[in-house]
Amino acid sequence: MHSARLRGILIILTLLITAQDALSVKVSELILRQLAIRSIKPHYPGTSVKNKNTGVAVAKVQIDQNGKVKTITVVQAPDAAISEEVRTAVRQWTFDIPKDMHLDDKTGRLLSSTLTFYFKISGSTSVVLEPQLNNRRNK
């Protein structure tokens, strides 16, 4: 009896998750960066430099039909200060969204992707790097 009920709950959850995914158009980071018309690189926070915190920061983003960032979720960052700098910078990005992507604020259909930044310290120099994305096709 309990297993049938559990199976029913799992089916409902699966349908809800599938419906949620159908509301977003997922693109690669390469495509997202090519659509950017304004991109701001995060600053390296002084406290992070002082503490020698380095590493990768990854933000999941959702973009609306007007090219505005609707949501930002930092899923990986070396520390809280870097996470906040990534949020602050990415919030300012804007994108040129092609009409054929059929995004719609009313239905919640948004463009989804990730943005990656590398925070590095070499000697007395601290830098924030963006990925070297290769847009050539393999033959």
Image: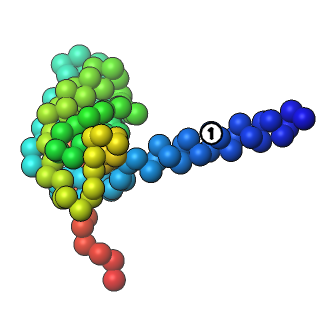
Judge the density around disc 1: few (<14), some (14-19), many (≥20) Cα neighbours within 10 Å.
few
User: Could you tell me residue 70's position as x and y percent?
Assistant: 26, 34
Which quadrant holds residue 39?
top left
Q: Nearer the viewer, residue 133 or 128?
A: 133
Q: Which residue is the extreme one toward the bottom?
A: 139
Q: Is residue 42 visible?
A: no
Q: Nearer the viewer, residue 135 or 14?
A: 14
Q: In the picture provided, is 65 more to the left or to the right than 108?
A: left
Figure quadrant of the C terminus: bottom left
User: Could you tell me residue 33's position as x and y percent?
Assistant: 20, 52
User: Could you tell me residue 64's position as x and y percent?
Assistant: 24, 42
Image point 50% across, 46% down: which residue?
A: 19
Q: Which residue is the extreme one toward the front?
A: 106
Vertical side of 87 occupied by 51: above or below: above
Image point 21% across, 46% down: which residue?
A: 65
Q: In the picture provided, is 138 more to the left or to the right than 38?
A: right
Residue indicated by mark 1: 13
Image point 18% across, 53% down: which residue?
A: 97
Image point 26% across, 23% down: which residue?
A: 84
Q: Which residue is the extreme one toward the left?
A: 38
Q: Secondary structure at mark 1?
A: helix
Vertical side of 5 occupied by 30: above or below: below
